[in-house]
Image: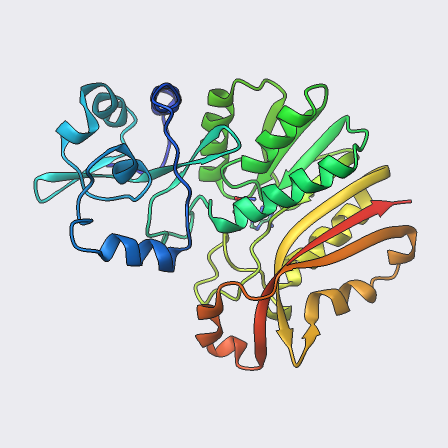
Amino acid sequence: MNNRLQAPEQSEALVAVLQWLKRQQYEFTTITPASHSLVNQRPGNETARDITGILGWSRLFTAEIAGRELFDLLQQANVLSAEGGLWRCSLRVSSLAGHLFLHSAFPTTDGDTVFFGPDTYRFANAISQYLALHKPHVQRAVDIGTGSGAAATLLAQEFPGAQVYGVDINEQSLKLAHVNGVASGLTNLHWRFSNLLNDLEGEFGLIVANPPYLVDDSARIYRHGGGLLGAELSLKIVEAAMQRLAPNGVLLLYTGVAIVDGRDLFLSAIKTLSNIGNMQYEYREIDPDIFGEELQNPAYVDADRLAAVVLTLRKL
Ligand SMILES: C[S@@+](CC[C@H](N)C(=O)[O-])C[C@H]1O[C@@H](n2cnc3c(N)ncnc32)[C@H](O)[C@@H]1O
């Protein structure tokens, strides 16, 4: 097995997998790793009984359960490994707003994991809620740290006349996002390798991001947010957006923040930014307690909690 996409034939086979799944009306909602692990440990859940067991729950499976057509496509995509007479797929497929997204299988331990999780759903909901109330004029939009390309895909659908970019520093993300984008049928999506906005030119009417925000001891790029107990990268995104938003352009940033002695480290840092006065911003805590198990990490010894927040920032 090779779970890293290299050959064009692999991508073509994966597009065919997504198209096959769409015809079967496949749906799967990805939950937290802790919950996923609990469900998979229940007796009887060692092996897959259906397609969601294979491609959602990342369970071992037999070729019969996959069926000939899907099994052949997964083999052509080179994403299967043999384990004790059974098979396992190195990718997962999750559904969101009528689209399907390939991402890394559970458990996500590799450094170049392609992320999709509960944060993706909260992020997508925050975008939908914002766009239901405001209709920014968007010619160019960018999703920073696009992962599987989920938010970029939603924006490409919402703004068919706009060019939508998904950027990431994980090559595997860009490859899977490309496959997901082709399967979506949307033609205004573009994928680029870029550290934040450093490798992409121009201004944007809409910038969205769900960046890594945790303190990850192995510094995996889909999780590790750097200093300020993980808020450093989010702060860099705010600074980059302030430089690159078109007039009236909007940044929508979904992120997680550490609250220490009742103080939100990220919000405190935003307030100290020198040109924040040229921006109109709104800051909402949308979930007071996420990933509570992370508080066991000694890095968080002074933290009360981790909260999910949404920052919207408009350039005046
Ligand atoms: C938590 S994941 C979120 C993925 C996706 N936005 C979503 O909501 O499912 C964070 C993503 O940011 C990417 N990333 C991390 N550092 C980055 C950087 N400096 N520039 C661009 N992308 C980065 C990671 O590779 C990963 O794909």
Give the camera-side residue of 298 and 63. 63
Colouring convention used in this rendered image of the protein:
rainbow
Q: Position of residue 309 (x, y in %)?
A: 66, 58
Give the camera-side residue of 253 and 42. 42
If the image is split into quadrants, where does the N terminus sit? top left
Q: At 60% across and 49% down in the image, what residue appears?
A: 210
Residue 312, placed above or below residue 176: below
Asked whether residue 230 appears in the rendered view, the answer is no
Q: At 45% across and 26% down in the image, what residue appears?
A: 179
Residue 95, placed above or below residue 283: above
Asked whether residue 132 appears in the rendered view, the answer is yes
Going by the image, does 76 lie left or right of 104? left
If the image is split into quadrants, where does the C terminus sit? top right
Q: At 68% across and 49% down in the image, what residue appears?
A: 253
Going by the image, does 303 lie left or right of 132? left
Going by the image, does 42 lie left or right of 123? left
Please tell me in which quadrant of the rendered image residue 143 appears.
Answer: top right
Q: At 51% across and 25% down in the image, what residue appears?
A: 181
Q: Position of residue 273 (x, y in %)?
A: 83, 62
Single out the residue that lies furthest toward the left: 85
* Count of residue discs: 0
Q: Position of residue 93 (x, y in %)?
A: 38, 35
Please tell me in which quadrant of the rendered image residue 248 appears.
Answer: top right
